[in-house]
Image: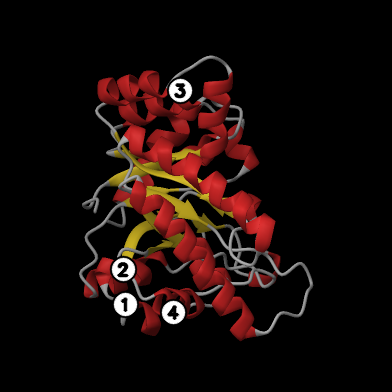
Amino acid sequence: MMTVGFGLHSWTTGDDVAVLKDIRVAGEAGYDFVELRDGKIEKHLMQGGSLAELADALAKAKLRVLSVNTLDDSTLHTGAELEERVARCEGLCSWAEALGAPYVIVGPTYRAGRAIPADVILERTAESLRRYMAVAGAHGVRIAFEFIGYEDCSVNNLSSALAALDRVGDGRLGLVIDAFHFYVGGSSFEVLERLEPGRLFIVHMTDADHGDRARLGKPNRIFPGEGVLPLREMIASLRRIKYQGPYSLELLRPEYWTMDPSFVARRGLESMRRFV
């Protein structure tokens, strides 16, 4: 398990910034970790790069990889569709193993307007997570499950995510809590403060430019401390449960993607340090 420190999620710089540049700017800014998007790794490999090249760049930047992410839309499928995602998980876990990343992040499926009973969601989510854990274990990595706060997501709050973990019943499975999705999904600090800290692998730091949960989306994410999210209360709750894991900056704002990635990385790290 990773110890306390600061990470840069590579989605923060936008999809057009190459993974090698993410590593360089994160190292220069003073981060401890990077979280690497699967699409950026894939693009690097398709353009003739190698995992060894990434590992060398990480060593030179004095960085560790916190996660390879994300296996999206992964929790409600059965049959051939589930097998496709298991195969994709195998690839992400092999990259994580090669890069020394302890976690592969998995995200839930959206209901897409379908009325799906809660017990079906819970059982399919748990079964999918068991499959992914088996793959991850063969590569010496763990699955970090991240709930997504939007109303149409099948697992959109901390309570539902914990129910899935309880159904799986394996202590090697843990959570990612994203401050934005914690707020949007209406998760409570009371539930957070009952969480065993060993079940929490990563905290994603961000803020929001307004407080209307129904209208919040990816473009509304801004630097921590510049918006309306109750970040100080969240950090206080995490301290009360003695969470000592990493905090990672994840901003998906197109406006930031037009800026110099080095500036975004430095400013993001400064913003997190005000809280942690």
Is disc 4 surrounded by few (<14), some (14 to 19) or many (20+) residues within 10 Å?
some
Which dot marks residue 167?
Answer: 4
Which dot marks residue 21?
Answer: 3
Where is mark 2, residue-wise?
199
Q: Are marks 3 and 1 in contact (CB under 8 Å)?
A: no
Which dot marks residue 52?
Answer: none
Among the two numbered marks 4 and 3 on one chain, the one whose residue lies closer to the N terminus:
3
Q: Are marks 2 and 4 in contact (CB under 8 Å)?
A: no
State the SS at label 3.
helix
Give the amino acid at mark 3.
Lys
Distance (Cα) linking label 2 and label 1: 7 Å
Q: Nearer the viewer, mark 1 or mark 4?
A: 4
Give the amino acid at mark 1.
Leu
Where is mark 1, residue-wise?
195
State the SS at label 2.
helix
Among the two numbered marks 3 and 2 on one chain, the one whose residue lies closer to the N terminus:
3
Residue 134 vs 158, above or below: the answer is above
Residue 50 vs 144, above or below: the answer is above
